[in-house]
Amino acid sequence: MPIDEFIEVSKKGRRNGDHIMHRENGTLVELNSKTGRAVGKMKATITQRFSFDGVEFDVECDCRFIMWCQKDPAGWKVHYKRLFYEKDKIMPVDGKHVPDYSEEELKPYPYGYRYLGASQARLGHKIKLDLPTMEDNDKFRGMYEAMEKWLRGEDIKETLGIPV
């Protein structure tokens, strides 16, 4: 999603009561000074508060932001960015109660993003279903292949599925 659209969706969501927080949990940078390229891997947790049928709960989703960067005369610039989802969980606010999700409701959403996707869908948000996760070995390997190629100075558009 383009940044301007993300900002507008976030503003609208906040007006509608969405309460979402992103926490940065550490960043690792791999640098190849010969090619002037780097890959940043930022671990983060997305937390969103929900309330359905009188049950208030949080959904936490651990993910990695992968950024492919290159140094140009003006400095470092991010050329590509992807999110990689690892796992999510439901946390009851009162310590006891969580909503019920059927297997059918969770089935369309990628593992690692199931509860967050299903909960956001209940609010009427459009959910992207082809998100890279730990359970999707092809996408997982593709992300790391793109990182290695980028650091060597190679083109990664095809590896990331970006139209040429």
Image (cartoon, rainbow, N blue to C red):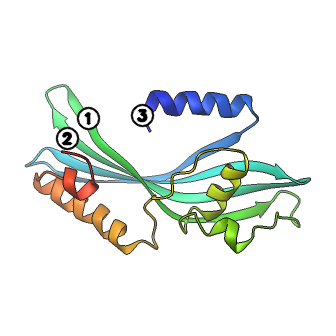
At x 70%, y 54%, the residue is 119
Q: Which residue is mark 3?
A: 2
Q: Callout 2 environment at 10 Å: few (<14), some (14 to 19), or many (20+)? A: many
At x 88%, y 67%, the residue is 96
Q: Earlier in the sequence, mark 1 or mark 3?
A: 3
- Res 70 label: 2
Residue 154: give x, y in percent of width and height.
Answer: 11, 53
Identity, as a three-letter code, of the amino acid under mark 3:
Pro
Is 36 left, or right, of 16 in this rendering? left
Q: Nearer the viewer, mark 2 or mark 3?
A: 3
Is 23 left, or right, of 140 in this rendering? right
Identity, as a three-letter code, of the amino acid under mark 2:
Gln
Residue 49: give x, y in percent of width and height.
Answer: 74, 48
Q: CA distance from mark 1 to mark 2?
A: 6 Å
At x 61%, y 64%, the residue is 114
Q: Nearer the viewer, mark 1 or mark 3?
A: 3
Which quadrant would residue 132 be assigned to in this image?
Answer: bottom left
Q: Which residue is mark 1?
A: 77
Q: Residue furthest front?
A: 104
- Res 150 label: none
Quarter holding the N terminus is top left
Identity, as a three-letter code, of the amino acid under mark 1:
Lys
Contact (Cβ within 8 Å) of mark 1 with mark 2: yes
Q: CA distance from mark 1 to mark 3?
A: 16 Å
Q: Secondary structure at mark 3?
A: loop
Q: Secondary structure at mark 2?
A: strand
Q: Residue furthest left?
A: 34
89 in relation to 24, above or below: below
Q: Callout 3 environment at 10 Å: few (<14), some (14 to 19), or many (20+)? A: few
Residue 38: give x, y in percent of width and height.
Answer: 23, 49
